[in-house]
Each structure stands twice: as structure tokens, then as C-alpha cells.
């Protein structure tokens, strides 16, 4: 996701006219957005066009969604026993071969 975001942010129409963006700035901004850190090497409001700001917003949403999904899954796992259907669905989302591997994955983290 970070690589795709950095490529999109390095496109010419992602920044405002007359402002060039090198790839390291785009990569740093995309990484910061996905990790929901909020750091940037350029001023977001003045450097990025509407398209660039939209890409940053989408990356922040994806990063936050990943964090919230993991937090809810961990909370559910810690407070109650998961049904077989919930384990299979979570295992499929994490690309596991067998639902019993889910416990191993969650304990490792």
C-alpha cells in the first residue's frame, strides 16, 4: 500500500503546479499516512493538489482501518471464545490454511 501510495503521490498532477515532488518525499508522506503518524516533509495544504490530498486521506483511512481491525480482533479473542465461523472468517482474512493457526498468529503478536 505504501509503494502504491508513493507512486501515486509522485505523479505530476498529485502536487500543485510549479511544485515538484521527489520520490523520497512521496515515499515518506505515504509511509507516514499509512502508519497514521502525521509527519510530512512538505506542507500538505500548500504542496499537494486535491488529488494528492485525496490519496493521503485514503492512505490514512486504510492505515487506521488496519489498526482498528486488528484491535477489535484481539479484543474479541481476549474476551470471549470465537465461534468456528468467526475463526474461519478471520483465518481467511489473514490467509491461514487452518482455523487453529489463528491462535498461533495472535499469540505471536
Image (spheres, rainbow, N blue to C red):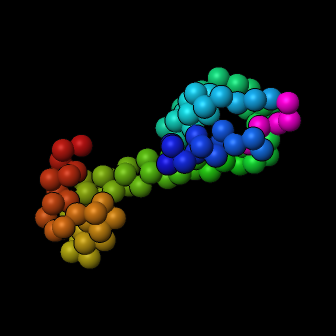
Segment colored magenta: 14-18
| Secondary structure mainly formed by the magenta segment | loop
Nearer to the camera, 55 or 86: 55
Residue lying at 70% horizontally and 25% vertically, measured from the top left:
42
Residue 88 in view in this figure:
yes
Image x and y of residue 48, in percent: 76, 36
Seen in the picture, residue 78 relative to 49 is either above or below; the reply is: below
The extreme right residue here reads: 17
Image x and y of residue 83, in percent: 23, 73
Residue lying at 52% horizontally and 35% vertically, measured from the top left:
31
Residue 17 sits inside the magenta stretch: yes
Q: Is 75 situated left or right of 27 in this image?
A: left
Q: Which quadrant would the C terminus be assigned to in this image?
A: top left
Seen in the picture, residue 85 relative to 109 is either above or below; the reply is: below
Residue lying at 69% horizontally and 43% vertically, measured from the top left:
11
Residue 60 in view in this figure:
no
The extreme bottom residue here reads: 85
Residue lying at 18% horizontally and 47% vertically, measured from the top left:
107
Image x and y of residue 57, in percent: 65, 46
Q: Is 104 situated left or right of 86 in this image?
A: left
Amino acid at each position: 500500500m505504501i509503494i502504491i501510495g508513493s507512486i501515486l503521490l509522485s505523479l505530476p498532477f498529485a502536487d500543485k503546479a510549479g511544485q515538484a515532488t521527489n520520490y523520497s518525499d512521496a515515499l515518506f508522506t505515504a509511509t507516514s499516512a499509512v502508519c497514521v503518524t502525521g509527519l510530512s516533509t512538505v506542507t500538505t495544504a500548500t504542496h499537494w493538489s486535491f488529488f494528492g490530498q485525496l490519496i493521503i486521506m485514503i492512505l490514512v483511512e486504510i492505515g487506521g482501518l488496519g489498526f482498528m481491525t486488528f484491535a477489535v480482533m484481539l479484543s474479541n479473542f481476549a474476551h470471549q471464545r470465537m465461534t468456528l465461523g468467526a475463526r474461519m472468517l478471520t483465518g481467511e482474512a489473514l490467509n491461514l490454511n487452518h482455523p487453529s493457526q489463528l491462535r498461533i498468529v495472535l499469540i505471536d503478536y
